Amino acid sequence: MQFSENSRVWVYQSDKKLSDTEVQQIQSLLNEFTTGWTAHNNQLKAKAEIRYNRFLILIVDESQAGASGCSIDKSVHFMQQLEKQFGIKLFDRFNLAFREGNEVLSAPRHDFEALLKQGSINTDTIVFNNMVQNLNELQTKWEVPFKDSWHIQLFRDLV
């Protein structure tokens, strides 16, 4: 199934790395959810994927039906159910993800700041911009150097 580069995306980041078994279970639930996801009784052209055993990504191609407030609420409630079922946090926007070699790690804001101060994270460290809005941005602006991300504004005094 082809999706437009303008398809809307929502990125939910787990506060911990998911096991392969958890990824399989969650992907199955995500597939079930997106298959039945509707907006005003119109089936949404939607899919979901999990990247790096940490990021749950919902994608909706609005060329046939747009995601409405109610349908977005459904997805939020679904993600909250996943949180409870798997003992994870998906809504902490200040749990910041970054690359360390081939590993994707995350840290709460104050720990991220400490890593920045000690030089473990620098302006070239790849960070994840979970605020991307569409598939094109997901492909081009999601994994970016710290210096090119919104994170730099948060820690401007430290770099």
Image (cartoon, rainbow, N blue to C red):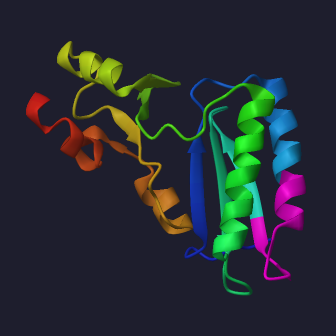
* Front-lying residue, 106 or 77: 77
Asked if residue 67 shows in the view, the reply is: yes
User: Which residue lies most toward the top here?
Assistant: 118
- Residue 58's image quarter? bottom right
Figure check: 7 above or below 103:
below
Look at 57% across and 73% down and name the residue there: 5
The verdict on residue 120 being magenta is: no
All told, the count of numbered labels is: 0
> Residue 56: x and y, percent?
66, 45
Q: Which of the 4 image quadrants contains residue 9?
A: bottom right
Work out which quarter of the rendered image holds the N terminus and state it.
Answer: bottom right
Task: Tell me where residue 133 appears, x and y as whole percent.
Answer: 49, 65
Name of the residue lying farthest toward the bottom: 64
Q: Quadrant of the C terminus?
A: top left
Where residue 17 sits, quadrant-wise, is: top right
Residue 44 is inside the magenta segment: yes
Q: From what the image shows, is residue 21 above or below residue 76?
A: above
**Residue lying at 74% horizontally and 73% vertically, measured from the top left:** 2
Q: Which residues are magenta?
A: 31-46
Q: Would residue 52 be found to the left or right of residue 136 on screen?
A: right
Q: Is residue 100 visible?
A: no
- Where is 28 relative to 119, above or below? below
Foreground: 137 or 28? 28
Relative image position of residue 120 (x, y in whole percent): 28, 16
Q: Position of residue 22 (x, y in %)?
A: 80, 28
The residue that appears at 88% across and 44% down in the rendered structure is 28
- Residue shown at the point (72%, 52%) measured from the top left: 77
